[in-house]
Image (cartoon, coloured by chain):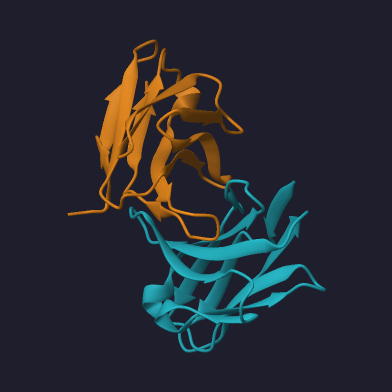
Chain colours: A orange, B cyan
Amino acid sequence: DADVTQTPRNRITKTGKRIMLECSQTKGHDRMYWYRQDPGLGLRLIYYSFDVKDINKGEISDGYSVSRQAQAKFSLSLESAIPNQTALYFCATRNGVNTEAFFGQGTRLTVV
Amino acid sequence: AQSVTQLDSHVSVSEGTPVLLRCNYSSSYSPSLFWYVQHPNKGLQLLLKYTSAATLVKGINGFEAEFKKSETSFHLTKPSAHMSDAAEYFCVVRAGYSTLTFGKGTMLLVSP
């Protein structure tokens, strides 16, 4: 089983719908992140959490919200999806200051 | 503040020839630097990382990178490209207690 699991892997939704992307990890890491990948733009940070009671906005948080339900679970919600939120979304975890991030397999979201 | 610039959006090489993917960074603190690879329809995999130890870092699959503080660079190299190296590569910087900042990616194309 993957250390960082994202569900769903693919989703098509309609404009205006609410959608939740889920992430769970078995690595025991305290830090969790949500990124968005668009062609030619790399990965951009949406939200991050250093522990259950700590939630922080990233560089592109508008239109998104998150919930850290437990140390192992971090969900990303689009309250009212719009077409320019069509992208590949990645969840990641880290543990400590000088460590690398571990990524899930990604969720491909299409808003029509 | 921190930023990272990948100098080439696409690099094309022939199988068996050297690979050079260029990355420059900007950071207010001593940085940690990473290279990740993303194969088509896959998640991100860590190739190598620099965290203030040896300036020449060796990674997986024959890749290596050299941290040059005077040039603020962290270029990725491989002596001989293989077809399986075709993928997108991301240079990533982290400084201080900040989050990870990604470059926009370099697509490596390998021809027979």
Q: Quadrant of the C terminus of chain B?
A: bottom left
Instruction: Look at 40% across and 31% down and name the residue there.
Output: A52
**x and y percent of residue B21 in the render?**
61, 71
Q: Residue at x 39, y 14 (%)?
A: A15
* Image x and y of residue B17, in percent: 53, 88
In this view, B8 is above or below A60 = below
Tell me: residue B61, above or below residue A29.
below
Say if B71 sits above or below A70 in the image: below
Q: Position of residue A72 (x, y in %)?
A: 30, 40
Residue B30 is left or right of residue A37, and the answer is: right
Residue B95 left/right relative to A108: right
- Compared to A19, does B47 lie above or below? below
For the residue pair B45 and A70, the one nearer the viewer reads as A70
**Which of the 4 quarters of the picture holds residue A89?**
top left
Instruction: Name the residue: 55% across, 26% down.
Output: A61
Left or right of residue B3, residue A81 in this image: left
Q: Looking at the image, which residue is at 78% across and 54% down?
A: B28
Given the current orientation, which residue lies at the most extreme right position?
B70
User: How many callouts does the rendering have?
Assistant: 0
Residue A81: which quarter of the image?
Answer: top left
